Structures are given as structure tokens and as C-alpha cells.
Amino acid sequence: MLGCAAQLTAQQTAQPPAPATKSGKAQIVGIVIDSLNGEYLSGADVMIEGAKATVVTDARGRFAIDGLEPGTYQLGVFHPLLDTLGLTIATQPFHVGPDSSISVLLSVPSKATIIRRSCPVRPRAQGTSAVIGRVIDPETLHPVAGAEVSIAWTQIEVSKEFGVRQSPRLIHDSTNASGAFRICGLPNSMKATLQARRGSSVTAEVPITIGEAETELFLRTLLLSRADSGTKVGNATVTGRVVLEGSPTNAGSRVEVVGTDVLALTNEKGEFTLRNLPSGSQVLLARHLGFGAEVVPVDLSAREPKQVTIKLPKFVAVIDPVVVTAKRVASLDKVGFTQRQKSGTGFYLGPERIQMMNPNRLTDILRQVPGLRIGYSPEGETVSGSRSATGSGCVQYFVDDMPWQAASPGDINNFVNAPEVVGVEVYQGPNTPPQYSRAMTDCVTIVIWTKFKIRDR
């Protein structure tokens, strides 16, 4: 990783003092440029060694220190971007005289420079892009050494010779003593997930997108808690607002922390609060009927509440072309849908059959499943099992491989858009696969796969 001051330079130019009363004091002015993103580095702390002072750069990366005694000084720059890069920006010591002004230009290196210095040449690399970052403890902010950081994606190829072929890809690195990692040789233009793990502690699978330029650099700091990931509660809090595109009201959206039992419904203003959450890099999932589901990474800590804004776009149902349907079948195969279907222990609906139904609501799909009964309540349509040995008729859901926590009976029909559903598995009692078995062994288990999880790329 980059980390020594000598890798960056400071340009210092003496300026003639303005015609004013001489005070014998000196001035240092400067600009910090973010060459990585082609903009100024605002909000950076500039520390003046020799004056025991710190100033913050403005929106244009500018800073100024007045009233300095003549002498020798050195500047250092600190910013979360530099922390993620494991990078230090500092000048060489320089002298300022009485009644003088010194201009200093400091710059973060370009992505090409960072990748060239950070990534060794790999003959079998998938590309020239890279993901660089750090893993830190969410409470102490200390680096986490020895954590495994992995990036996973699916590479799908389509040709006349072999049809649709998908290849899961996984590359990983271990953090060093400063918690830094680098994953190099990645392709551009892809969606992937990033995850950190150490022992029984693991972050959520954080979604990332690598851009379309020939060489891309993605930066991410991950928060990895010391607590066992099986612990689904903690002392972190997240508040926020869900905004519905083109809607006169923002009420009634469902927000949950993926992998926990914590969820909330938004009020009229779209506001929500989730408490008692585990610390670390987590993922929020927001849903509203008639709008596309959105996932938002969130770094949680008991140190301070987190605030987020989630925008849900209107959901527009489209007929998928044949090649997209084929890709989704391949993605379903990746999550075990096809293998379980071959076992014959349940009832299965795939993308082609569901698309032929042209469903408006989730219950339009579930009506086609033997052994399910659609009823009505003041809250709307409900689903129950008709073949329960005890007659309880209970139903438990999994959506995109996660247990569905109901805020009210039958609410799944109000949050999952039927046109987003690409696969359904239904199991009766003891025939349920182990990964979907819960305490209520007599219940019907319905596993729903959506375009949110089963992507077409």
C-alpha cells in the first residue's frame, strides 16, 4: 500500500508581500487537489508542524494560516479518503521568513498512479481495475489485521456455441497490520459484493459497482466488529428517510437490516428509526409495493447514530427478452434452485412460467401452487397451507434466501412486487430443505427469488 510521504510532493513558491504595514509575521496559503476524482479535496485537516495548529480546507480545497513566526514548518494532510488508501500527504520541511507568504500545492495521486504502485502485474488477471481499502473496528476505529477480504461476482457469457455460461469468481486478500487490503486484476463494468471476515465475525456482503472506464479504482473502508456475526442485536442505531419517486406520500415503506430481525415501517414523511443493531458494515433493504427495491450499505457503530436517505424508483414491469430469461435461469442455478427442483421434494415455478402468468400481485403467483389457500382479511389477501397435519395452516417465507419478518399478517403481499419475482419454491413440513427449516416444522415454507437477488448479468 502507498504510505510514505516521499510519494507526494509539495510545490512551494515565494510570493512578494502585499504593500502593507510590516508585522514580521508570515503566511502559508495552499490548495489540496484530489486527482483521484478530478476535484478539490474539501474537508481535509491540514496540520502545521511547528505551529501546533490545524485548519480545514474549504469547498475548493483552499486553506490559509496567518500570523506565523518566521521559522521552519511542515504540512500534513488528513482525510477519510487518504485513510482508506493508507496514504500520507506531507511536505518536506520548509522555511518562511518575516513578512512573507508561501503558496503550497498538495495533490492526491491519480488512480493510474495508485494502481501502478499498489498492484503487481498479474499475467492471468481479469482486468486492470482494483479495489483498495481498510478494515477497522467500528467502536475503537483501530485497524483489524489478519482479516480476509473477498470480492465475489458472476461472469456470464452468451454465445451460439455453448449458450449461456456463468462462472462464479472470487478473489481475496488479507489485511496487514494497518488493516489495509488491495484486490487487483479485476475487470471493469461489473457489479460485485465485498465482504470482510475474521474468525466468527463477518460483515454483510456489501454491494459495489466498478465503473466502465478501462481501469477503475474502487475505495472502501469496511467496519468489522469483534462480536460473533450470529449476534443479531447490538447498540447501534440508524435513522433515515425513504423517498418514493413521484408519490404524494412517503408512508408505509418497509426498511430492514439484512440478516437481522429488525425492521420498521416509515411514517407519512418517510422517516424511520432502527435501534439495537449490531455494529459493522451492514446492508439496509427498503421495499414498497409498486416501487423497485433498493439496498443501501450502511456502516453502523454504537459511537454515533447513522443517517441515510433511500430513494425508491417507480417499478416498471417489462417483458424480459429470451436471453435475459436464460441468464436468470443460470443465476437460479447458482443459488441451488435447479438442484432442489430435480430432487422433486417441493413445488417449483421458474422465470418462464411466472412471466406467462403476467401477475399483478404475489398472490396471483401463489394461487397456482397446490396446497395453498388464499384468504381475505382487513389487511388484504393472506396465504395459508391447506395440507397441514395439525390444521394450523401456518406459512413461513424466505425472500432472496433471507427469512421474512412480518410486521403484520400477510404483509409480504404489500411489499414484494409480483413482476419482480423470478422463482418460487414451496415445501410442505418435513420435506423442507435444512437451510429453510425453522422451529415451526409443520408450516408450509415458501422461498421467493426476485430480480433483486437473481440478476440478469
Image: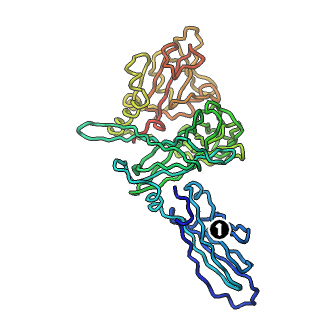
- Rendered position, 204 above or below 79: above
Q: Quadrant of the C terminus?
A: top left
What residue is shown at x 61% (from left), y 41% (from top)?
A: 224
What residue is shown at x 59% (from left), y 16% (from top)?
A: 440
In the image, taking residue 258 as reference, residue 64 lies left or right, namely right
The crowding category of the residue bearing disc 1, from other C-alpha atoms within 10 Å (few below 14, some 14 to 19, many at least 20), is many
- Rendered position, 90 above or below 22: above
The picture quadrant where one finds residue 23 is bottom right
Task: Kindly state the secondary structure of the residue where label 1 is placed.
Answer: loop
- Rendered position, 236 above or below 122: above
- Measured as percent of width and height from the top left, residue 247 is found at 59, 46
Q: Is residue 246 visible?
A: no
Q: Is residue 168 visible?
A: yes
- Measured as percent of width and height from the top left, residue 449 is found at 47, 31
- Measured as percent of width and height from the top left, residue 296 is found at 57, 44
Q: Amino acid at mark 1?
A: Thr
The picture quadrant where one finds residue 55 is bottom right
Report which residue position mark 1 lands on.
57
In the image, taking residue 196 as reference, residue 267 lies left or right, namely right
The picture quadrant where one finds residue 94 is bottom right
What residue is shown at x 60% (from left), y 75% (from top)?
A: 104
- In this rendered view, identify the residue nearer to me: 185 or 402: 185
- Rendered position, 248 above or below 97: above
Quick one: which residue is furthest to the left in this view? 161
